[in-house]
Image (cartoon, grey):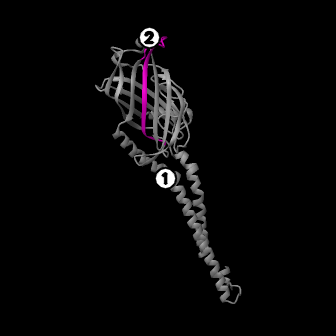
């Protein structure tokens, strides 16, 4: 009986040892994915910000600028693109809506972001765009891949509609979570005007006045390394209206402010990410290491039973004077 038990334990030990790497390297990349129907709203604010008054073309200081970023998963479009590309795809329709202290619209920029649900790599299908202009993204946007590495990534900037490196700057503790801090600086760059401007002004009207829009920002993200989700984001953002063909003429500040995530949205985001990271850790750490440890325990028990069985057999032979064990015809049958 001990021999049979040791063999059963050995079989289970081998099974657990084989299942451990399969969960981590085979099951996890296929099971971990961004849900297609996700819906999120994040509110960001900039206090004592500078805004241009398009009626007078002069800057003014406002006590608060509010930016509402809405992200909605387009499930129907994701199915369509997935059928076309043969990939598991997520389509996010997003809107960045900036409003002044009186609630009046300052700018409104819609986007469509199409990416692989597992790797977060861009998928160039499904009408990806920024403010109605087709784009071809290179690198990530909004979300990092699962199991973030301590390295630089390429991050898409919606203003310039190009990608640039976003640099890993170290590990920090944020609201009790160990996170990776990333930073990206976009130098002064001429960018397109939003299609929708305050007071019904069109981009053509601004261009006819001899003005063009320039922009720079310092972008900061605190990223959960397990899920790849940002738990906080900030930007030190500046925009100017410069006179076309007149570099010596004083530019008009169009926007200047330190945009931060509102504290209540930081708290809700941290709580959401903290719960989601447990599911990822279950497949990447808890189950693989647990199975490996269980396999080691079962192997030790199997060897212990085998050794005990051998000692028992040796003791029986010694008790019988070293004579071989007698086998009855019934036992042979």
Q: Is residue 60 above or below residue 155?
A: above
Kindly check if marks 1 and 2 are in contact, taking CB atoms under 8 A apart as contact. Answer: no
- The magenta segment is 228-251
Residue 62 shows up from this direction: yes
Q: Secondary structure at mark 2?
A: loop
Residue neighbourhood size for the residue with mark 2, other residues' Cα within 10 Å, grouped as few (<14), some (14–19), many (≥20): some
Q: Which mark is residue 253?
A: none
Say left or right for 297 vs 279: right
C-alpha span from label 1 to label 2: 58 Å
Which residue sits at x=42%, y=48%? 274
Q: Which residue is mark 1?
A: 282
Give x and y (percent) for residue 15: 59, 60
Q: Where, by quadrant of the figure, is residue 46 drawn?
A: top left
Give x and y (percent) for residue 52: 36, 19
Q: Which mark is residue 210?
A: 2
Which residue sits at x=61%, y=71%? 303
Q: Where, by quadrant of the figure, is residue 38 drawn?
A: top left
Q: Is residue 247 above or below residue 308?
A: above
Which residue ends up furthest to the right in the rendered image? 323
Say left or right for 228 vs 262: right
Q: Is residue 12 above or below residue 195?
A: below
Sequence order check, earlier mark of 1 and 2: 2
For the residues carrying marks 1 and 2, which lies nearer the camera in this image?
2
Residue neighbourhood size for the residue with mark 1, other residues' Cα within 10 Å, grouped as few (<14), some (14–19), many (≥20): some
Give x and y (percent) for residue 63: 30, 28
- Is residue 241 within the magenta segment? yes
Give x and y (percent) for residue 218: 46, 31
């Amino acid at each position: 009986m001990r021999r049979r038990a040791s063999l059963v334990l050995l079989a289970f030990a081998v099974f657990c040892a084989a299942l451990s790497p399969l969960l981590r390297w085979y099951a996890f990349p296929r099971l971990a994915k961004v849900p297609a129907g996700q819906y999120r709203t994040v509110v960001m604010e900039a206090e004592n910000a500078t805004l241009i008054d398009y009626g007078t073309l002069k800057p003014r200081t406002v006590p608060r600028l509010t930016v509402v970023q809405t992200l909605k998963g387009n499930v129907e479009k994701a199915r369509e693109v997935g059928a076309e590309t043969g990939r598991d795809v997520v389509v996010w329709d997003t809107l960045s809506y900036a409003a002044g202290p009186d609630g009046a619209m300052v700018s409104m920029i819609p986007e469509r972001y199409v990416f692989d649900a597992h790797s977060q790599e861009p998928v160039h299908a499904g009408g990806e765009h920024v403010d109605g202009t087709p784009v071809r993204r290179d690198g990530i946007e909004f979300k990092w891949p699962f199991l973030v590495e301590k390295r630089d990534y390429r991050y898409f900037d919606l203003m310039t509609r190009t990608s640039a490196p976003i640099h890993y700057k170290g590990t920090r503790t944020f609201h009790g979570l160990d996170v990776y801090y990333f930073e990206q600086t976009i130098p002064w760059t001429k960018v397109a005007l939003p299609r929708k401007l305050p007071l019904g002004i069109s981009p053509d009207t601004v261009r006819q006045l001899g003005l063009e829009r320039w922009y720079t920002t310092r972008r900061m993200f605190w990223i959960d390394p397990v899920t790849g989700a940002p738990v906080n984001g900030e930007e030190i953002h500046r925009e100017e209206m410069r006179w076309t063909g007149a570099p010596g003429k004083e530019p008009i500040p169009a926007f200047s402010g330190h945009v931060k995530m509102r504290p209540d949205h930081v708290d809700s985001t941290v709580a959401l990410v903290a719960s989601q990271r447990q599911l990822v850790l279950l497949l990447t750490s808890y189950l693989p290491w647990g199975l490996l440890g269980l396999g080691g325990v079962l192997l030790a028990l199997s060897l212990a039973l085998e050794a005990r069985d051998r000692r028992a057999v040796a003791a029986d032979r010694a008790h019988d004077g070293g004579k071989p064990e007698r086998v009855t015809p019934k036992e042979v049958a």
